[in-house]
Image: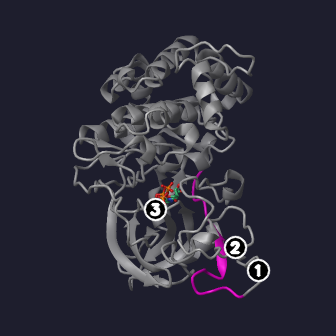
Amino acid sequence: MLHSKFSPACFYPEYHYHKSFTTVQVSRHITKIGYYCSQFSTSSLNSSPESPIKYRWIDGVERLELYEPGGYHPVLIDELLHNRYRILDKLGYGGYSTIWLARDETLKCYVAVKIGISNPSDSHAPAVSHVNACTALPSILDAFDIHGPNGTHTCYTLTPAQGSLKEASFSRLFPTQVARALAAKLATAVAFVHSRGFVHGDLHLRNLLVRLPSSFEELSIKEFREKFGEPDMVPIARVDEKPLTPNVPAQAIVPLYLGKKAQEFTLDDAHGLILSDFGEAFSSATEQRLGRHCKIPLAKRAPEAFFEPDEPLSYPSDIWSLGAAIWEILGMKFIFSESESQDEIVAEQIDNGAIPRQPTDDREIWPCLENAFEEFVQKYRRRREAAGKFEEKETQAILDLMRSMLKFRPKERLSIDEVLNSEWMVKWALPQLEQGQHAVI
Ligand SMILES: Nc1ncnc2c1ncn2[C@@H]1O[C@H](COP(=O)(O)OP(=O)(O)OP(=O)(O)O)[C@@H](O)[C@H]1O
């Protein structure tokens, strides 16, 4: 059964738009990017022995089988939620929620509404803790419940963001300065979370959002429609061709990406990074999260999550994910191949040096860290001159940091303070983040 992790975020800090963002790209490239929904199986939520209803496949939208009791709420464009939030378009979805752009008719501003699956039996919610402001964490503006054919859904409103770094970086590279600043901003956000006693537990590029420019807020609804178009709707049909039940909407909506492409990112965008989705976060001191409960996609999981499934996870697993996320920010490609089996992923971790063992069989060998950086990061950067590449000294510092973050044994990994004090952070990444600081409010 699916455990809902949709629950109040652990953090309620404030954050603000920054001033100097210029262009906003209009693109629905979600179908090419392909959201992963690896947390849930292809089966429905219902424990009913009857086979679940199947729908015709629609590229780039949430799993339609989850429109059933316990699952997603069928949302209509133009629907008014909580007597206040007018739905304009869809921004995204995850295994536990759909996220919508709405107009707050009371405050006359745009909001993102996160509508959770309805799963009343949920007992997996993380502890809620109030912590101080950090500019890189999302703020929850409002919370309410809605009732529908699939049950009661908890909803939160958040400041809408451009989209995730994953969407921005699809087949593209961040300029080196931006990549450094993004890595530094992310590390400071993780340091903040760890300093408050929390493990994020779900660190990857899809959970890294970027603030929208203040100019977005100035758009009237008419201007918004002119700029971004009407929602991209695709009729839903059942495989058995029977009529739809009220549990599922008549139309699926392909999410709208409000953001820029990676190569268009500026240092100001890097300052606008938001570490989002605290649904898996837990307090390391008071809660136990075992390796087997890790929801991060297999290829991105720290090795202890599958080698020691009965041991509690802690800060080091965030450090592993942070190392992998920084690598992906620098090179656009995840450090390990993403669609392999667990054995193949472990083999890659061995080959690149995370696990200290020499391969003995005749299987294909994954390159060591140096070669992987050359092959998967620098080569592409050289091909796209505008993106810039990393010089030798910096490359060495990056690789040293990666090696110390991607240590096989969790205890041997750097702490987040050590990450922030590493040579690469101190000499290259943090100074780059500071450059552009003046432009952010
Ligand atoms: N405030 C926001 N503004 C714009 N888009 C957002 C916002 N929050 C979330 N999204 C989009 O929705 C996607 C899913 O959001 P989120 O990860 O919070 O959902 P979830 O159900 O908790 O997902 P998961 O299954 O990944 O844990 C994000 O990757 C992003 O593209």
Range covered by the magenta-colored residues:
243-260
Task: Give the label on residue 54, or none.
Answer: 2
For mark 1, what is the residue?
A: 240
Q: Is mark 3 within 8 Å of ligand 1?
A: yes
Q: Quadrant of residue 63?
A: bottom right
Q: Determine if residue 50 is in view.
A: yes
Identify the secondary structure beneath mark 3.
loop
Amino acid type, label 1: Asp
Tell me if label 3 and label 2 are in contact, CB under 8 Å.
Answer: no
Q: Quadrant of residue 239?
A: bottom right
Report the Cα–Cα distance between label 2 and label 1: 8 Å
Image location of residue 335, percent across then percent down: 60, 30
Amino acid type, label 2: Lys
Image location of residue 318, percent across then percent down: 40, 36
Identify the secondary structure beneath mark 2.
loop
Q: Determine if residue 181 is in view.
A: no
User: Foreground residue, 397 or 408?
Assistant: 408
